Image (cartoon, grey):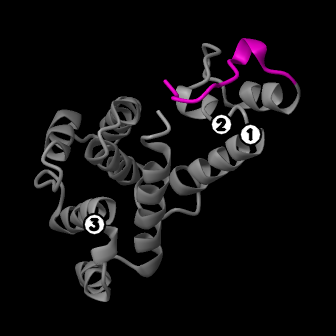
Amino acid sequence: MAFINVIPPAEASGRLEKIYKQVQAPGGQVDNVLQAHSLRPHSLAGHMSIYKAALHHSGNVLPQWYLEAVGVLVSRLNGCDYCDGHHSAGLQRLLQADAKDPAAYLAALDQHVPAEPFTSKEQLGLAYVQKLTQQPWQIESADIEALRAAGFADGEILEINQVASYFAYANPPVL
């Protein structure tokens, strides 16, 4: 629930109504995180553009399940039950499709700096996400060098940054 006034889908008109129709779920609902932008439809359009580019663009190299795990971790660190729940469900679907055990991965994400079943490379990426989320002012070149040494290419580091930043944007205090 937003702390500011919102225009619910049933009361939307013009550009907002058009955007709501584009972003509604199959059951017709519009997520609260999106309704929070209703007073400025242009920011809702921007929000959706960032979301799709960060998490669902075909140009991304990291597995989509790993990007979802980044989002779940950021949401948990920020205490956003809404995004945690929504994206944990998405992560479960992606992990099952990749023949991985969703319960083990979600349990590891409860640790905030996850361990197994994430690989050591994935763990390092998630430890970076934790630092980026909770202490971004402490990020230094050594953090990036460690990611490179673990096998992350600069474009993959960018993907991690983009997803973590998107969730920092979408998490509280908007909800």
Q: Earlier in the sequence, mark 1 or mark 3?
A: 1
Picture quadrant where residue 14 is located: top right
Horizontal side of 18 relative to 72 (left or right) equals right
Marks 2 and 1 close (CB-CB < 8 Å):
yes
Q: Which residue is drawn at 74% across and 12% down?
A: 10
Q: Which residue is drawn at 23% across and 78% down?
A: 150
Residue 54 drawn at (x, y percent): 53, 56
| Residue 96 shown in magenta | no
Calculate the distance from the C-alpha at mark 1 to the C-alpha at mark 3.
30 Å
Picture quadrant where residue 97 is located: top left
Horizontal side of 69 relative to 118 (left or right) equals right
Q: Please, what is the three-letter code of the amino acid marked with disc 1?
A: Arg
Residue 29 drawn at (x, y percent): 61, 17
Calculate the distance from the C-alpha at mark 3 to the C-alpha at mark 2.
27 Å
Q: Residue at x 32, y 87 (%)?
A: 141
Marks 3 and 2 close (CB-CB < 8 Å):
no
| Residue 11 shown in magenta | yes
**Would you name the residue on which mark 1 appears?**
40
**Would you name the residue on which mark 2 appears?**
37
Most extreme residue toward the right, as rendered? 14
Horizontal side of 16 relative to 170 (left or right) equals right
Q: Please, what is the three-letter code of the amino acid marked with disc 2?
A: His
The magenta region covers 1-13
Residue 57 drawn at (x, y percent): 59, 55
**Would you name the residue on which mark 3 appears?**
135
Task: Name the residue nearer the viewer: 87 or 65.
Answer: 87
Residue 29 against residue 68 in the figure, above or below: above
